[in-house]
Image (cartoon, grey):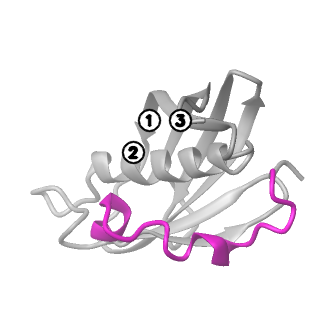
Amino acid sequence: MIWFNKGLTAAHFAGMGKGNLGEHLGMEFTEIGPDFIKGTMPVDHRTKQPYGLLHGGASVALAETLGSVGAAMVVDHTEYICVGQEINANHLRSVRSGIVTGTAKPIHIGSSSQVWEIKIHDEHDHLVCISRLTVAVLKRKDR
């Protein structure tokens, strides 16, 4: 298990998205495993582009949310914070409706950086987007 808090469950994330982008886009954290975190996002008026397809930026927002939260859950919050440095995404398949599910898993967990891979699938388990997120692990300055 990679999590700092060994008792971590998806319930710990219930209020995390309140009042921010995650709530606005309808994101929900759904599952946490020994080395992954999952979440969903609807494909609706909030997340579509003008052609009626899932907006690539919405996919990236889901990817960064899952990867960033995953990265933050690996470190001691009293000592460190994790901030995004770089994200890329390949959009592989269009989605017009339903729900997409993202799964974030670490590729590298280091003392000063982490790299996470996030795969987003549609309701038919088709790979829609694959993304890689690099985060910096920084010592808290407010301590």
The secondary element bearing badge 2 is classed as helix
* Residue at x-position 54% and y-position 76%: 14
**Circle on res. 60:** 2
Find the magenta span and give its range. Answer: 4-25
Q: Residues at badges 3 and 1 in contact (C-beta under 8 Å)?
A: no
- Is residue 136 or residue 102 the one in the foreground? 136
The disc, 3 or 2, on the residue closer to the chain's N-terminal end is 2
The secondary element bearing badge 1 is classed as strand
The disc, 1 or 2, on the residue closer to the chain's N-terminal end is 2
Instruction: Give the image quarter of residue 91.
Output: top left
Magenta segment: does it hold 20?
yes
Please state which amino acid type lies under the numbered disc 2: Val
* Residue at x-position 59% and y-position 32%: 140
The residue at which mark 1 appears reads as 89
The residue at which mark 3 appears reads as 142
* Residue at x-position 30% and y-position 46%: 56
Q: Position of residue 137 (x, y in %)?
A: 63, 28
The secondary element bearing badge 3 is classed as loop
Q: Residues at badges 1 and 2 in contact (C-beta under 8 Å)?
A: yes
Please state which amino acid type lies under the numbered disc 3: Asp
* Residue at x-position 44% and y-position 35%: 89
Q: Quadrant of the C terminus?
A: top right
Q: CA distance from mark 3 to mark 1?
A: 33 Å
